[in-house]
Image (spheres, coloured by chain):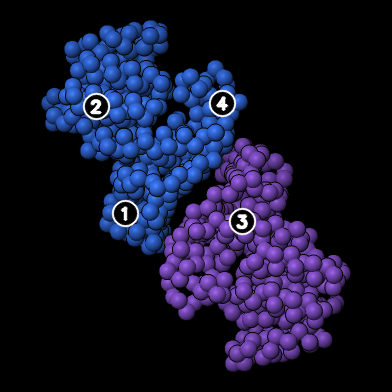
Chain colours: A purple, B blue
Amino acid sequence: MKKIKWGIIGPGIIAHSFAQDFAHVTKGELVAVASRNEERAKKFADQYKIPKVYTSYESLCEDPEIDAIYIATPHNFHYDQTLLALQSNKAVLCEKPLTHIAEQTDELIAFAEQSGNYLMEGMWTYFLPVIQKAKQWVKEGKIGKVKHVKSEFGYPVPYDTSSRYYDPKLAGGALLDMGVYNVAMACFFFDGKEPSDIHVVARKAESGVDHDVTTLLVYEDEIANLTTAFRCKLPNSCIIIGEEGYIEIPDFWRAKECRRYKMEDCVEVFEDHRNGNGFEFEIEAVSIDLLEGRKSSEVVPWEVSKHLQSVMKKIMEKFD
Amino acid sequence: MKKIKWGIIGPGIIAHSFAQDFAHVTKGELVAVASRNEERAKKFADQYKIPKVYTSYESLCEDPEIDAIYIATPHNFHYDQTLLALQSNKAVLCEKPLTHIAEQTDELIAFAEQSGNYLMEGMWTYFLPVIQKAKQWVKEGKIGKVKHVKSEFGYPVPYDTSSRYYDPKLAGGALLDMGVYNVAMACFFFDGKEPSDIHVVARKAESGVDHDVTTLLVYEDEIANLTTAFRCKLPNSCIIIGEEGYIEIPDFWRAKECRRYKMEDCVEVFEDHRNGNGFEFEIEAVSIDLLEGRKSSEVVPWEVSKHLQSVMKKIMEKFD
């Protein structure tokens, strides 16, 4: 059986989780890693038994064996590296946010379309069985008309001017790093509907990046209430509230469980007893897309990325 | 031992809970009830073994045996009835919100001060051991500097134009009925600090009253995120988030438990194993205030009611 051969650009924290999850994937295998830091690349390759190590992104992109490239570098590098990989006729899975400048997402998508290469933003949360189950419950009308989506994502990130999280030049800040997951939940459960109004309360760290952002996305008769922070541990649930019940998804971004409530009672629980970190579903789905010749994902279609980026842009425009 | 003798005006739903809780009070006893509906008053008196029944509020207020009057009628009657009771030289505990027009709260307080009579807004939630414990944890610095207070209160109330909940003339609407509890939490945990900005997204039922309101109270570097609704069952927790942990209070308005978290771990739980509905703490505290000759409450001082009303006013001014 043919497997999709994957290469990774940027062996950072998230790439470790991603690489580990190939243990739970049947349609893809990890064959190469690239980092400008040779030692780092080799150590990563040793750890996950990856046969090929590259010390330039160009050389990884030129490797004819590789089908798909996963880009796991900081946001500000996504545009250039995605473009490089697409120009090398590789399929690209790029970590979210695809870009930190909305217009660049449009450009990348236009280039992918024109060059006929696969491109997907790595919104891996959308592929989690729990998130898919919650969406199914909503579609089946189990909580009635959805009126509120509440989503929180916040972890303390110690203030450090040498960290990319706090560096404006590296597209730092809580919204781009963690808040994007909240915005993704609003887009997902409100089916890409356009907000008619946006309220934002953003607080900034000394370095100038946002470290605490509350956003209300106002729709026709619905609302998304989103909080992200670098300075507080938030409870980190996503809650979808309908007129006839609600769904709670603890730690939604890496969800393993969702619970459906009617009034005070929990009436249904769905559990995902996976062994992986959760990237396995995304890797498998993209591998299948490629094996079946699709150029974009049905789970994270280009329209979803465009919409997500446009909402992110509108939120950032309201920062002081 | 002397006990404070209480009378109730308005034997509605909340008065039932209140009357039941005298079973758990040592410093007060319930001696009278008044309703313009004689049958209703008698039935209520029978149920709670209340010796005196009045069919006019005036006659209850004129009863020299009565020390304190609890006003449990709809909000729009609070002003007139509180004034009537104060003019009769009675101590007054009036259900929250004390008035639905902020200026009237100021007037009532001025009158109480001038006439030398006790007056307290019935924010019974403030007296609950769980809420007091949460405040103690905050004061002791157990969650670090508080940055977010999130509070939800929503229950489905079927749309009915004959119900006071949906009647604009009876000061209906979710904010005045349930949302006031959220605002009270913000005032409590942010110590009456004045918000510098307020964002409101309010949706209205056909009758014109608000049935779904999301409010952001923006402080210097903190935020209160409050939701109330008549059209959805909300999860109804209050969460106080500090830089070093957070406190979750399920069903905060009638709280029986609070939990303190550091990162993912619940590190402390406080439980209130009371037998009553929770009004017993308020009734006991007001009775003690009166026995000790105080003219206002230290738990719900007049400044707190004035502040609460002024914030409620600012929120309502942002309704379309």
Residue depth check, mark 1 versus mark 3: number of the one nearer the observer: 3
- Sooner in the amino-acid sequence: mark 1 or mark 2: 2
Q: Residues within 10 Å of mark 3 (few under 14, many from 20)?
A: some
Q: Which residue is mark 3?
A: A314
**Which secondary structure lies at badge 3?**
helix
**Chain of the residue under the numbered disc 1 shown in the image:** B
Residue B315 visible at all? yes
For badge 4, the amino acid type reads: Gly
**Which secondary structure lies at badge 2?**
helix
- Sooner in the amino-acid sequence: mark 1 or mark 4: 1
**Which secondary structure lies at badge 1?**
helix
Point 80% across, 71% down: residue: A111
Where on the picture, by quarter, is residue B37?
Answer: top left
Q: Position of residue B149 (x, y in %)?
A: 41, 50
Pointers 1 and 3 within a single chain: no
Label 3 to label 2: alpha-carbon separation: 47 Å
Point 72% across, 75% down: residue: A82
Point 52% across, 64% down: residue: A174
Query: Is residue B219 or residue B140 the one in the foreground?
Result: B219
- Sooner in the amino-acid sequence: mark 4 or mark 2: 2
Viewed as shown, does residue A12 lie left or right of B45? Answer: right
Compared with A211, B274 (above or below) is above
For badge 3, the amino acid type reads: Lys
Q: Which residue is mark 1?
A: B138
**Chain of the residue under the numbered disc 3 shown in the image:** A
Q: Which residue is mark 4?
A: B208
**Chain of the residue under the numbered disc 2 shown in the image:** B
Which circle marks residue B110 in the picture? 2
